[in-house]
Image (cartoon, rainbow, N blue to C red):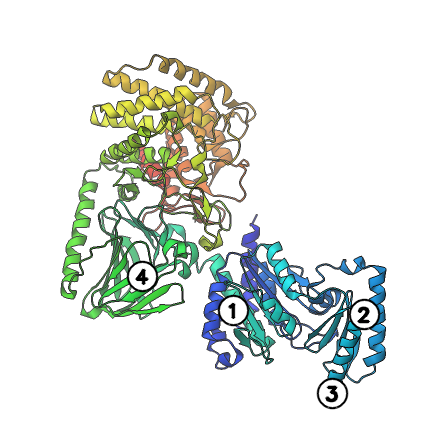
Amino acid sequence: MPTPLNQTVADSALLTKSLPLGLLRAFVQSEAADDGLTPQLLGELKILARTPGLLVACNYGGTLCAAEGISTETLPLGGAAIALRALAALPNTHAAVISGRSLRDLAAVSRLPAEVHLVGSHGAEFDMGFAHGLSLATESVLQQANQALLEAVGAQKGVSVERKPVAVSVHTRSAAPDIVAKCTAKAEEVARAFGLFFIVDGSVLDLSVVQPSKAEALDHLRARLGVSAALYAGDAMSDELAMETLRGPDMGLWVGDLPSPAKHRLKDPESFARVLGILFELRRSWLFGEDAVGLERHSMIGNGSSTALVTPDAKICWMSHPLPDSGSLFAHILGGDGAGHFSVEPVKASRVLGQRYVDSTMIVETRWADVTVTDYLEPAPEGITSLVRVLSGTGAARIVFAPRPDYANAPFSMEARAGELHVVGTSDPIILLAPGVGFTVTSDGRHATATAEVNLQHGPVVLNLRCGDTEIQQPASNRAVTDEADRRAAVAHHSRRWVQGLTLPGVKPSLVRRSALVLRALVHEPTGAVLAAPTTSLPEGIGGTRNWDYRYCWLRDGSMTVNALLDLGSTAEAEGFLRWLAGILANAPGPEWLHPLYSVTGAPLSTEAIIESLPGYAGSRPVRIGNAADHQVQLDVFGPIAELIHGLSEAQDSLAEGHWELLVQMASAVLARWHEPDHGIWEARRAPRHHVYTKVMCWVTLDRALRTAERHGRSPHPAWAEIAATIRAEVLREGWDDSSASYTVAYDSPDLDAAVLHIGLSGLLDVSDQRFLDTVTAVERELRVGPTVFRYKYDDGLPGLEGGFHICTTWLIEAYVAVGRIAEAWDLFDQLVNLFGPTGLLPEEYDPGTETHLGNHPQAYSHLGFIRCARLLDRHQRG
């Protein structure tokens, strides 16, 4: 079933086709400035369109439509009604009409749909039942006033008297000026006589029993709807009162030629209809992404401390500084151009011919017919990020440098200084070194953007963005290219030397090599910590809310990542990770109180927060920073650490004293807490349970500790063997569910979970045991869909849908191999290979229904699982 938000996207796309004028067409009209549609107005509309919650409100007669009066033939312009309805259909966007008409009359003449809020009688009527609450005495006063007006002015030519639920109105639109003056004086006299509020609203004179206030109505709507900004448009004195309440990013629009202090003036309602259409297009583009690029098509560059994502057309769309979990400098992937990007493209428009990694490196090349862009992050001292972009070819290239620090929330300016661009006003120095490039800097008042065009026929152009560097040496223009070539060669040599030390399987060696390089780039070398992914909030379901920040080191994920590299022959990452962990334990109250995840610095995480100003990838909100899983109890984390220490000691045929101490601490943590419920591997935000996978990992911890002790002549704790046997017996007994004919997610639960495959993969249960064979069959039957395996399908207490997890797919491949179903393992493995992106990267998940790649990208889990499967299948080559 499509989600409501997905349906909204489809509906909005249809509505766009019906708009009176498109965004670009509106502003190329020669009479646009005369209508009031100025570039300044467009700039402010762009800012307004990017507010988290938006209210668009306006008057009716004279603003939304040209005619006044009480005739039911008075309808709003077709385009205005469509645009207002389209805006109301967007997420976190509301529309309202606040009119002097009675609510009943407003609903009848406007014929606006229910999603547009209607407010009548100058803000007095918010619902149709209001008038029935008037006392008999008040009704009598209105009746007397109505009669007095009929007698005094009712016979005047061009004048009509209307009785409203809370007022009496005199309409003078068709009357001569002298008659209007006479009627106004008489109506004001009647109002005083009966103690009524008197207001002149264009050609309508209202005598009301309640104080008319569009301003209060606007404030009431803002509070009730919880919006962060409002646009209000009007053409009468009562509308000016509403505009006086506007503040901050709000916008007021005056429609018509009457005098008004409003900043922006539009010629007529047709111009306002065009503004509504423009605002809709701008906001929809911001909410749903500007042609969101498939996640798997992004390439990552990294240098061991910093990472960045590059789109297929060479746009730097994600980068943070100075730490992986610091605020972003470029966040285009989460918010379009306004969230920051660093783009290069040919001046002469052409298609991208291809993007690739330079062999055995994290250097990315993007190529057009006459322009090539080479991107890499070079090693730099801790706290400094150095991004290098080399432009070469025979054509001309256009450069757009649009940093937006701190998720586009930090204002700054920019200065061009002789081949350098200086970002001014940020906490860390940010300088773009660009010898020979002449930039033009523009600003929207909050953020600056630099643009330039360069002719590459005269030779390559080197752009070096350095963040945090206070002692930059600007190379002379004629040395820049030579210096860069040497630097790039050194980066490539260092990477290739590392790759040459790996032992790659014969199965898909190029993809395994790329996966290994990705995992190594996720290792934060200054600390030894390992990122689960370099990104935050890339959605597990388009339009959904399962958007998490993965720029941290999970003890589980980190152990598994460096273990995969260990299996390929690289030990340095495992040793660095264990040093990092030892540093955390040195300051912990005890190993049993380890958090599931930490910042790469070893610090606990700050509170999870939402960046309201970013719409998210393809409109998938919210964008989160921090991760509340930090506060969960996850008792399985000790198992992967123990398995890593066991594997490292085997690979090195020795056991370091510090590693043995870590292993003892993991085992003691299990002895202390294995019997407790926890939140499990999947971090479900619900009450703790006795998860089968957790218990299996507790057993793994003690089992690997016992094996390591035996292999290296250490003395195990007397309780290890006994507790390991107790855990195993309990899991085999309590984890089985007869109704499912399988081991399940938790004790006393029939729900399936792909992670329970580890009951056999870990060695706790013999893989030939019928119970494991049945569990593999159950997972295959219930959780596999085509090329992917879902982690579970039960209610986890979170809204929204998700895709299948690549790590779960690799577990099922491993299980197929373990039980001898080799042909099926190869088949599923081949399907997984087909899901890799064009440059060899995998995000976290895949939705087989929509064939959409999902989740943070690239994901360590996905790549380490692939490496494990390739190595396993290397021992079972196809016959």
Marks 2 & 4, CB-CB < 8 Å contact: no
**Location of residue 310 with respect to 41 vertically, above or below:** above
Query: Residue 278 bears which disc, if any?
Result: 1
User: Residues under labels 3 and 2: Cα distance?
Assistant: 25 Å
Disc 3 secondary structure class: helix
Q: Is residue 471 above or below residue 732?
A: below
Q: Amino acid at mark 4?
A: Val
Q: Earlier in the sequence, mark 3 or mark 2?
A: 3
Disc on the earlier residue, 4 or 3? 3
Dot 1 or dot 3: first in sequence order is: 3
Residue in view at x 73 percent, y 75 percent:
205
Q: Which residue is mark 4?
A: 424
Q: Earlier in the sequence, mark 4 or mark 1?
A: 1
Depth-wise, is mark 2 or mark 1 nearer the camera?
Answer: 2
Circle 3 residue: 178
Q: Could you give the CA–CA distance between mark 4 and mark 1, rounded to whole angstroms?
A: 32 Å
Question: For this rendering, which residue is in front, 464 or 323?
Answer: 323
Q: CA distance from mark 1 to mark 3?
A: 41 Å
Q: Is residue 442 visible?
A: yes
The amino acid on which the numbered mark 2 sits, given as a three-letter code, is Phe
Residue 534 image point, x, y percent = 35, 46
* Crowd rating for badge 1 (residues with CA inside 10 Å; few <14, some 14–19, many 20+): many
Earlier sequence position, callout 2 versus callout 4: 2
Q: Nearer the viewer, mark 2 or mark 4?
A: 2
Residue 194 shows which numbered tag?
A: 2
Question: Residue at point 35% right, 29% down?
Answer: 588
